[in-house]
Image (cartoon, rainbow, N blue to C red):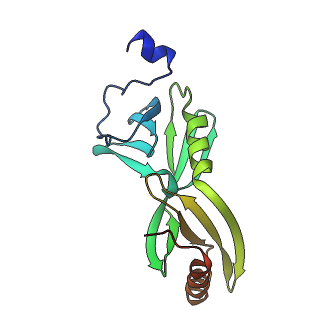
Amino acid sequence: MSLLDRLLGRVELPAGFTGRLDPEDRLLAAASTDAGPLLVTSLGLWLPEPDGPAHRIGWHLINKVSWQAGTLTVTEAAELDVVDGAVLIADRPPRRLRLADPGRVPEAVQARVEGSIRSRHHRPLPGGGAWFVQRKVPGRDGVLLQVRADPGTDEAALRRVAASVAASLPRPAS
């Protein structure tokens, strides 16, 4: 890494990274874990995989993230279905990664996840409720409506309300 790169705060791609960055993807921060390097980029969070190449989770697909006692916990969203433009999602099992030297990673991850959220609200529904979250997706115009149901929420009611909310949102120009 050159002196200019250091002065400008540029981050070097760590040795052992098994993913492949897109040309428009910019590296913002990196840290080592027991499983391999973890990268924070402009398009998402790259997690090491023990049995294959690293994979990127887009910022709009991270439902929860926390930093505690040297461990970054990431909960990725699984996209279940699309109802009239609303994407129904559910939490995948949380992934816990111990960072040897976290550097700027926790702050960068938190800023990117929060920065992707344009609005969020919880709405009670029969049997439970659901979170309605509008998120910005890097490289796309407009926002994406995601709906994450609480356990026990009536699915038919969820789908009706998700469709109604999606219909009320402005559509991006084609």
Choose top left, top right, bottom left or bottom right for residue 103.
top right
Counting from the top left corner in percent of width and height, residue 164 is at 60, 84
Residue drawn where x is 47% and y is 52% of the image = 138
Seen from the viewer's position, the closer of residues 34 and 66 is: 66
Residue drawn where x is 28% and y is 43% of the image = 53
Seen from the viewer's position, the closer of residues 43 and 90 is: 43
Seen from the viewer's position, the closer of residues 147 and 37 is: 147
Question: Taking 105 as reference, is 114 above or below it?
Answer: below
* Quadrant of the image containing the N terminus: top left
Counting from the top left corner in percent of width and height, residue 158 is at 59, 83
Residue drawn where x is 70% and y is 67% of the image = 121
* Quadrant of the image containing the C terminus: bottom left
Instruction: State how many labels appear.
Output: 0
Question: Taking 10 as reference, is 108 above or below it?
Answer: below
Question: Taking 172 as reference, is 34 above or below it?
Answer: above
Drawn side of residue 84 relative to residue 131, left or right: left
Counting from the top left corner in percent of width and height, residue 139 is at 43, 53
Choose top left, top right, bottom left or bottom right for residue 54.
top left
Q: Residue furthest top?
A: 3
Choose top left, top right, bottom left or bottom right for residue 67.
top right
Is residue 152 visible in the rendered image? The answer is no
Drawn side of residue 119 relative to residue 4, left or right: right
Counting from the top left corner in percent of width and height, residue 109 is at 55, 41
Is residue 117 visible in the rendered image? The answer is yes
Question: Taking 116 as reference, is 27 above or below it?
Answer: above
